[in-house]
Amino acid sequence: MKRFLSLFLAAVLGSASTVGIIKWFDKDSQTVKIEYAQGLPVSQAAYSVNEKGEFIPLDFTAVAEKVTPAVVNIRSTQTGTTRSSEIPEPFREFFGPQQQGPSRATGSGVLINAEGYIVTNNHVVQGAELVEVTLLDNRTFKAEVIGTDPDTDLAVIRITEKGLPYLSFVDSDQAKVGEWVLAIGNPYNLNSTVTAGIISAKGRNINIINNSTEQGNTAIESFIQTDAAINPGNSGGALVNLSGGLVGINTAIASPTGSYSGYGFAVPSNIVSKIVEDLITFGTVQRGWLGVTIQTVNSDLAKQEDLEVSEGAYIADFAEKSSAKDAGLQKGDVVVKIDNATIKTNTALIEYIGRHRPGDKVNVTVNRNGKVVTVPVTLKSRAGKTEVVKPEEKETYAGLGLELEDLDQKILKKLEIENGVKVTALGGKVARYTDMREGFIITKVNDVPVKSVKDFNEIIKKKKSGELIILSGTYEDFPREFNYAFRY
């Protein structure tokens, strides 16, 4: 009698090429170390074979034990809104419906070093007046919000404890579709839940981060898609490979019911690490910007525009203060490579540029009417500057949840106003207590004219806790006066 032994082996050795240990500095000028793992192997086998030739299911227990202590539970609390009776009659309508007492939200976070720094989602802590972190051993700490980034839905918070377990970033570019991953978080307040699945796709744009301005959408979406079960409460938790390296931060699900239905999405670790570094070092994200309106090339676009390529990011238009236009890129160019990274979609371009700061230089390779042209581009901020934003320029209005930029004379003349600053990002108290939208031009604070971001800072610095603040101004696309009121 013949015995047939069928063996199935699918083990591929991968590694995460990283840059060792990077030192950043917090606002107290203390050295903060964020560790990057080097050479972590990634197993992609559904089964292993023991020395007896027997099939053994892949064991997740070791990695689960390793990573769960570094994933925390986060509870954020928002107190009730200002009472209508405390607000002058003309401005009560701008507060919207009043909350009945405090509201609470829960989510997850990942310790990224032993000094208590935690990365989570912006929507987990946005607008919170109290953030509490509970560790695996049930110790609870109040946390400080170091910084947030609505464009990627990421945030960094910190607890005052040291010697903590943490996870190391790995190179998400090296993660492969079909690779096994684990999702760790606190769905439905079920602490330290571990689920397993594979990477289903990379570079997904699902249009969940709504952050648009007249200069174009500033959101960065290039998610890792996974079929590891992710549910409400997993937000901000870890997506790890089978060596325990942090591949991404779980952020969203795609579901008709609001619960897991087979699709989960995580922000790749390469984006996370850049955002974390900026928030810790500068207190705000330093984002390089090409200033282009782009479309993913497909067969229809290639036929319509008579393109010589079937993949890439088609440049349809330029924004004001465009780095790309200033460098010599043209409408109709198809970006096919930036530095050594192949660009097949607009999502790939946005992700790659999103890892850079103003002042960084990139080589953009385009297909122009069938010819390959490489153009060096020095990235600028959306304000058209190559310098990074200093922390002190953000500290005053960061607590309000606003990011602002000075206006140029063209916009002032167009709107027939003499002064103002533009809201480029919106969150915190202003988002919670008013219906202001991005693009709002603040011309006055409590009837005091605002000529610059510096002016705004100086006015806000003089306000006391609980004082009523009224922001007056207009919109480019709806030029009439609006007033937004809230308590400082």
Image: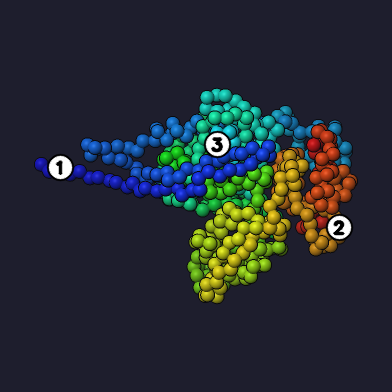
Residue of label 3: 113
For residue 215, side relative to residue 134 (left or right) = right
| Label located before the other in sequence (3 or 2) | 3
Residue 101 found in image quarter: top right
At numbered mark 1, what does the secondary structure look like: helix, strand or loop? loop
User: Looking at numbered disc 1 in the image, what kind of residue is underneath it?
Assistant: Arg
- Counting from the top left corner in percent of width and height, residue 360 is at 62, 58
Mark pair 3, 2: CA separation = 48 Å
**Label 2: element kind:** loop
Upstream in the sequence, badge 2 or badge 1? 1
**Which residue lies at the image location 58% right of the left edge and 61% below the top edge?**
362
**Place of residue 388 in the rendered image (x, y in percent of width and height, measured from the top left):** 68, 52
* Residue position for label 1: 3
Q: Amino acid at mark 2?
A: Ile
Question: Who comes first in sequence, dot 3 or dot 1?
Answer: 1
- Can you tell which of label 3 and label 2 is closer to the viewer? 3
Quadrant in which the C terminus is drawn: top right
- The residue closer to the viewer here, 171 or 181, is 171
